[in-house]
Image (cartoon, helix red, strand yellow):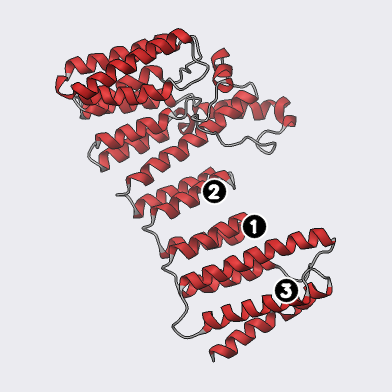
Amino acid sequence: MAADKARFYLEQSVPELREWERKKIFSKDEIANIAKKRSDFEHLLNSRGESTPSDYAQYASYEMNLNALRRKREKRVGVKATSYTGQRRVFFILDRGTRKFPGDLRLWTQYIEFAKKEHAHKKLEKILTKVLRLHPIKPELWIWAAKYMLEEQADMLAARGYMQRGLRFCENDAALWLEYARLEMIYVAKVATRQRILGLDETATKQDTEMEDGMTADTIVLPEVTAEDIDPGLRDDKEYNAALQNLASMPALSGAIPIAIFDSAMKHFKNDEMLAEQFFDLVAEFDQAPCSRRILQHILDSLIHSRPGSMSVCICRFKLPMFGSLPTSPDFPGALRGSLQAIRGSMEDFPEAKKQLAGRAASWLKQLVQNADMDVDVRTALTASIGQFSKISEVG
């Protein structure tokens, strides 16, 4: 029975192999090796109780590599085998594997990644529906689906829907709450960038240009704004421009949704100060989003209200003055002065946490001093502060 099933699947590929040989994409010996390899895999997969998820994964990987080689050969030889597709064979193998081993996430991941690579969007949406129905308590799957809908399909409503459904099943997973907030911030940052490019952001100043010019490897990479996002022909469309300007007043762009996510997370996790600090650091990455400072201030105010004497309050107070200020900008020295005053004030107010606060401050300042374009005087002051805080953190 197993041998008959394997033979049936192998017979399906005979016309494909003959075409490859006829068009001289592969030699006769190579065709024989391909047929033998496929035969070995099929007999292994169809043997009763002996196959494993890794067998399906290896078979799919073999076919992926074979398909890539075939495309290179076709390009080199100048022919194209249009009658058959290696994509369909890989999908067939992975579909069989996930049906036999529905609980193996690695196999599902391979299936999803291949569909994404091949731009098989309809197929991918079906795969996501199946895997999320089988594994609703796996937060990484909800996160992947939401990111895919935003980044690849530009469908924020669908992305938000995945996150909200994921939270129903995985409400105790802090990472999912954080990634939901990140998704909303990416959306805000993308629209803000679009407004700035079209010249519709009235608040855009010289500082915005300096921030763009001063982007470093440590700065978050915003989603690429493509020609599909911004049609030059729309620049003179008054209705379009007015609609884009009005977006700034929407809850999604005013910071209302990230704030709501944070408040819900704090309520669910009983005002966990470490989680609040993670939210703060996440939002601080989006220094070009116009609502970021408002969200950061809200997080800090919430921390002060719920955990007034906590380490997280002191650290957030220390970081907030420098938000959006690049080490090369004219306002950086003033922002640095405000941060240093905040951390020193906290060390005086909470002497029992002085050593730990100094260590956290030194660690964060070390990241800033690495900027190669920083003013010499500013670097000197920053290095001196790092030395002072490091000494305090070591001796207490």
**Image quarter of residue 93:** bottom right
Which residue sits at x=26%, y=25%? 313
Which quarter of the rendering shows the C terminus?
top left
Question: According to the image, label 2 marks what residue?
Answer: 149
Circle 2: is it few (<14), some (14-19), or many (20+) Cα within 10 Å? Answer: some
Which residue is disc 3 drawn over? Answer: 30
Query: Given contact means CB atoms under 8 Å apart, are the residues at marks 2 and 1 in contact?
Result: no
**Quick check: 279 left or right of 354?**
right
Q: Of the residues tagged 3 and 2, which is closer to the observer?
A: 3
Mark 1 or mark 3: name the one nearer the start of the chain. 3
Q: Which residue is mark 1?
A: 118
Name the image quarter holding the N terminus: bottom right
Left or right: residue 385 versus residue 144 is: left
Q: Amino acid at mark 1?
A: Glu
Q: Nearer the viewer, residue 137 or 330?
A: 330
Q: Position of residue 297 (x, y in %)?
A: 35, 23
- Under circle 1, the secondary element is loop
Q: Residue at x 63, y 58 (%)?
A: 120
Q: Is residue 361 above or below residue 258?
A: above
Helix or strand or loop: what does disc 3 sit on? helix
Contact check, label 1 and label 3, Cβ < 8 Å: no
Q: Nearer the viewer, mark 1 or mark 3?
A: 3
Amino acid tagged 3: Glu
Q: Which mark is residue 313?
A: none
Residue 345 visible somewhere in the drawing: yes
Give the percent coordinates (x, y) of residue 204: 56, 17
Along the polypeptide, which appears first: circle 3 or circle 2? 3
Q: Quadrant of residue 223 in the image? A: top right
